Amino acid sequence: MVESDFISLLAQNKESVVNTWAGALKDMKGSSFESRPNEELIELCNQLLNGFLEALETNSYAAIRRIVTDGVNRAKLVLGFTPGKGGPTQRPYSLTNALDRLIETFNLSEVLKAFQALRPIVLKVIKEEYRQDRPQLTEAWGTMDECMGMVALQLSDIYQGEVSQLISGHLKHIESLNSRLSRLSITDGLTGLYNHKYFQYTLDKEARRSHRYSGSLSLILFDVDNFSRVNESWGYETGDIVLQAVAGTLSRSLRDVDTLARYGSEEFIAILPETSKEDAALTAERIRRELEKQTITSVTGGEVKVTVSAGVAGDQGPALDKQKVVLEVEAALTRAKEEGRNRVCAV
């Protein structure tokens, strides 16, 4: 599937998506959307969806930035900011009150929640369209998630700039916001693990450390066996639950110094510093056995059993080539699947 097909699909279903999206925002308890008129929510969703479609089509997120920035500027007018020759001026009331009113008028974190609410709506559309074509469904899903991740980056960028500009004295509050927003840009939304971008960053850092101190470095690449059958038999919602459960087990089974990331749709990769390939293989086997024993509860209350295959690769010191290790761990995983799955293979 080419990306334009996905864009056309969303454009064709635009009215239905916008109305469903506006209804989901209206039902968002405790948010400012709850008190907004339906017409206003439909207009907001229509603008944001236009920006989302433009982002998909042009691979540029300027439209989303523009929509959100315009909203912030309108909020500033409500707060009493007026342009002057020397720059913006502010009417006399406390900065704390100004910040509270800005957040109430145009809550950027709620805009991020709004895009999170869009995900299941778009997912339903592409599931209905590509139910009989698994590769196209997977590609459309990946395209959507990649765009959602970039939206989160754009919103975090705007949020950081606006809050810092408004109230520099609230350093602790700003640092907390920045920390949470920065984490959004490096984590996978479904599992809470690090994403592929952060994996590449950490691998580069750990490889340099290994070269400097002649230390060992190993990778383990896990793949949920026959995951497409889980989706087909139990549904995509249960598939998400399975991925979250596997991610949780992997997180609990690794050390604090290890880095775990979502590598692909049903693939997870772990970086193990100061760990030989042999020890990494033992770790992978221990985790494989633990997952094999687990039972995961589906959306309907049924019991789902899954297994994982794992590939292991590693090297030490100056001999370590990070690109080579990645290729080797992928090859090891492929061999584990070819040899029957539910096993660990090392290169």
Image: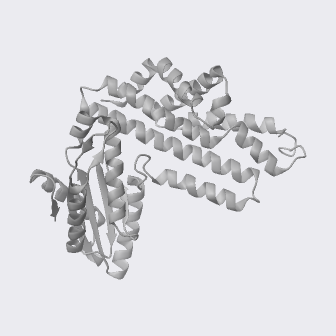
Colour setting = one colour
- Figure quadrant of residue 110: top right
- 107 on left or right of 308: right
Question: Relative to the observer, which residue lies in front, 319 or 225?
Answer: 225
- Figure quadrant of residue 325: bottom left
- Residue 50 location (% of width, % of height): 53, 26
- The residue shown at (21%, 52%) is 307
- The residue shown at (40%, 50%) is 191
- Figure quadrant of residue 303: top left
Question: Looking at the image, which residue sits at the far left?
Answer: 339
Q: Is residue 56 above or below residue 274?
A: above
- Residue 63 location (% of width, % of height): 57, 33
Question: Looking at the image, which residue sits at the far bottom?
Answer: 213
Q: How many marks?
A: 0
- The residue shown at (36%, 70%) is 255
Give the quarter of the figure containing the N terminus: top left
Q: Is residue 97 above or below residue 260?
A: above
Q: Can residue 331 be seen in this snapshot?
A: yes
Question: Looking at the image, which residue sits at the far front?
Answer: 301
- Residue 136 location (% of width, % of height): 28, 31
Give the quarter of the figure containing the C terminus: bottom left
- The residue shown at (54%, 30%) is 51
- 129 on left or right of 121: left
- 315 on left or right of 91: left
Q: Can residue 262 be seen in this snapshot?
A: no
Question: Relative to the observer, which residue lies in front, 343 or 294?
Answer: 294
- Residue 328 location (% of width, % of height): 20, 61
